[in-house]
């Protein structure tokens, strides 16, 4: 217990005067005020983690680990109510500090122990566990960093064990993850320290001028810094996960194309679907963050809604057949052939709704996708004969990480982000996603979009990959990851392109000449990064065509790289269609 008798606290109370005591009390009060949110996030994320790895880890261990999480969370909740009920807070600040510090460290210790006690064997699930730990520590940046030592204790105890575990694994991949976690630890700690310093300055200025800083303003400052930390975390983790996924998905595509054995084809299809599922989880998290921060905007383009709906239904038919669920679609013939809308986000809403409807509908029942047109709106309904939703839970299902109840999560899985994202997207469309449901009978989810009719439908050209076959044009690829080098070289040489590889931006600059028709430039590379290399090449060769290739996959990233001078943008994992579109627009094929 001597560890918790922090001299820093005693000095605040006894030697630094009344001002320092007021500042410390304010920061401690904020820490306790945020404690319930932290406990809820811990329990929710812990449950998601347990559900995700339950098939790869002993159930006994998972139960013990989560039971300890619940036990420590209850103790932390008790410390919260004890603090709130204490009428002599000013005289017991050091006691309350010790309690919250001890509870935070205990929670961190449980999460840190997951690196050994419940760490799965699967590399993909290991990444998911790390994602959860990093997400928890990033989220704690806003709630714990008012007192930096509390945050530092939490993040060190929860993250360092993973660094140690990966450091002892004899593989370059493990060392890479370990190094990435070290950099992440330094980044979030630096952000937390800045938050602490900014809060100190704000409070000190307010008290010095006899103008108490309003609690709302304090929270706003912290929230802004926390949002910055969260965005940094999401961008970093997205980049680190997308980089290996690029190789995984690329090689699967090559193997599926060349494989003739039906059994192996089926196995490769399962791996491919799982990879896309993981990518979908990453995209859901990124989309939710953009919606939460108000950064997402709709992009209105010409769209044939009826064709989009038919294609969407076709995607779900194999799943329905496998599950024994009937999928019916009713498309109103009055819907215009061409409207201006954001087809991608519309498909995202309908995809989430259909996926949920099929998931919760038992064998022998049916799901209906219905659309109707009443100028100037198109109304959509997804109707199922599934388990239904109790009326008391119908509002909460649109909140993040929420399903009807915990048994639903255990039985059907899912992160609970799909409906929340769909609801927020419907608001962007100027509508609202509504639900009508009867328990054990089924549900109806509905929303509308404005249908602005096009003047004329653009004629789309369906170009197959076989139409692209180049006449040995030279292309330079700058990529430091050896696995991705081999993958992109296979793909490009299959199109009869003459490929030269550069290991970093410096090599790319030295290798480039006017003979190259195109450069695919990775952004994060040693020696010289992709941005520096692009600028140096274009300074000498103004006609050079250079495409940014990066795992930084947010919409604002694309805009940033185009504004910097790149001629195009490809996000990792590289989709074949996106790559072909770039080659088609930049190089003349035979």
Image (tube, helix red, strand yellow):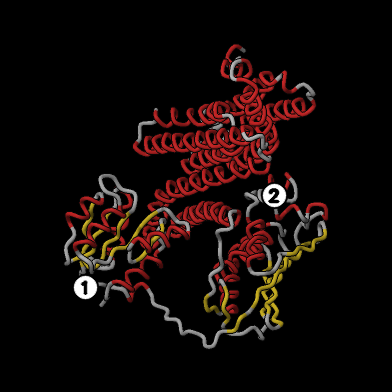
Residue 381 screen position, x and y as percent? 71, 70
Residue 448 screen position, x and y as percent? 69, 72
Rounded to the nearest angstrom, the CA distance separating label 1 from label 2 is: 54 Å
Q: Which of 381 and 158 lies nearest the eye of the viewer?
A: 158
Residue 330 found in image quarter: bottom right
Q: Report the residue at 33% width, 66% height from top.
A: 567
Circle 1: is it few (<14), some (14-19), or many (20+) Cα within 10 Å?
few
Q: Is residue 67 visible?
A: no
Left or right of 171: which side holds 98?
Answer: right
Circles 1 and 2: CB atoms closer than 8 Å: no
Residue furthest to the front in view is 209
Circle 2: is it few (<14), some (14-19), or many (20+) Cα within 10 Å?
many
The relative height of residue 456 versus residue 462 in the rendered view (above or below) is: below
Residue 125 screen position, x and y as percent? 51, 42
Q: Report the residue at 73% width, 45% height from top.
A: 407
Left or right of 34: which side holds 583?
Answer: left
Callout 2 secondary element:
loop
Q: Is residue 590 visible?
A: yes
- Residue for badge 1: 471
Residue 347 screen position, x and y as percent? 58, 68
Mark 1 or mark 2, earlier in chain? 2
- Residue for badge 2: 402
Q: Which of 7 and 472 lies nearest the eye of the viewer?
A: 7
Residue furthest to the top in view is 2
The relative height of residue 223 versus residue 61 in the rendered view (above or below) is: below
Callout 1 secondary element:
loop
The relative height of residue 206 versus residue 558 in the rendered view (above or below) is: above
Give the quadrant of the C terminus.
bottom left
**Mark 1 against mark 2, which lies toward the viewer?**
2
């Amino acid at each position: 217990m001597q560890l918790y008798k922090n001299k820093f606290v005693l000095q605040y109370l006894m030697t630094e005067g009344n001002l320092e005591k007021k500042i410390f009390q304010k920061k401690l009060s904020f820490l306790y005020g945020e404690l319930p949110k932290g406990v809820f996030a811990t329990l929710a994320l812990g449950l998601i983690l347990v559900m995700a790895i339950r098939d790869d880890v002993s159930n006994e261990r998972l139960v013990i680990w989560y039971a300890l999480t619940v036990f420590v969370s209850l103790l932390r909740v008790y410390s919260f109510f004890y603090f709130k009920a204490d009428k002599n807070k000013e005289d017991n600040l050091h006691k309350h500090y010790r309690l919250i510090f001890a509870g935070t460290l205990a929670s961190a210790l449980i999460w840190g122990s997951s690196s050994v006690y419940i760490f799965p064997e699967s590399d993909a699930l290991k990444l998911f566990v790390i994602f959860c730990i990093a997400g928890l520590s990033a989220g704690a940046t806003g709630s714990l960093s008012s007192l930096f030592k509390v945050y530092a204790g939490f993040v060190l105890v929860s993250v360092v064990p993973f660094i140690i575990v990966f450091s002892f694994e004899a593989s370059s991949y493990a060392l890479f993850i370990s190094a990435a976690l070290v950099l992440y630890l330094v980044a979030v700690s630096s952000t937390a320290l800045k938050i602490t310093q900014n809060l100190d300055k704000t409070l000190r200025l307010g008290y010095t001028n006899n103008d108490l800083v309003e609690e709302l303003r304090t929270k706003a400052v912290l929230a802004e810094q926390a949002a910055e930390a969260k965005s940094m975390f999401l961008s970093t983790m997205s980049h680190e996960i997308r980089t290996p996924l690029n190789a995984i998905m690329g090689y699967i595509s090559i193997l599926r194309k060349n494989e003739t054995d039906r059994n192996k084809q089926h196995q490769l299809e399962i791996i491919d679907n799982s990879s896309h599922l993981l990518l979908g989880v990453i995209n859901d998290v990124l989309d939710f963050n953009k919606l939460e921060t108000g950064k997402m905007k709709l992009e209105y383009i010409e769209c044939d809604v009826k064709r989009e709906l038919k294609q969407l239904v076709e995607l779900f038919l194999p799943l329905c057949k496998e599950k024994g669920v009937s999928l019916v679609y009713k498309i109103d013939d009055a819907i215009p052939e061409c409207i201006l809308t954001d087809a991608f986000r519309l498909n995202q809403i309908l995809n989430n709704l259909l996926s949920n409807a099929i998931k919760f509908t038992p064998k022998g029942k049916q799901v209906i996708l219905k659309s109707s047109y009443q100028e100037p709106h198109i109304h959509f309904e997804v109707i199922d004969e599934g388990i239904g939703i109790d009326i008391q839970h119908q509002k909460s299902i649109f909140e993040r990480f929420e399903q009807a109840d915990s048994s639903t999560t255990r039985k059907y899985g899912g992160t609970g982000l799909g409906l929340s994202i769909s609801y927020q997207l419907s608001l962007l469309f100027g509508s609202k996603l509504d639900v009508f449901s009867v328990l054990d009978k089924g549900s109806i989810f509905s929303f509308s979009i404005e249908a602005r009719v096009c003047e004329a439908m653009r004629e789309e050209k369906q170009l197959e990959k076989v139409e692209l076959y180049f006449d040995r044009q030279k292309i330079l690829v700058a990529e430091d990851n050896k696995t991705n080098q081999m993958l992109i070289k296979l793909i490009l040489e299959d199109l009869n392109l003459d490929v030269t590889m550069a290991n970093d931006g410096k090599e790319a600059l030295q290798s480039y000449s006017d003979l190259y028709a195109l450069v695919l430039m990775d952004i994060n590379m040693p020696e010289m990064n992709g941005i520096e290399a692009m600028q140096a090449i274009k300074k000498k060769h103004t006609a050079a065509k250079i495409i940014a290739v990066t795992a930084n996959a947010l919409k604002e990233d694309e805009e940033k790289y185009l504004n910097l001078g790149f001629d195009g943008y490809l996000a990792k994992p590289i989709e074949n269609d996106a790559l072909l579109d770039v080659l088609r627009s930049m190089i003349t094929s035979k």
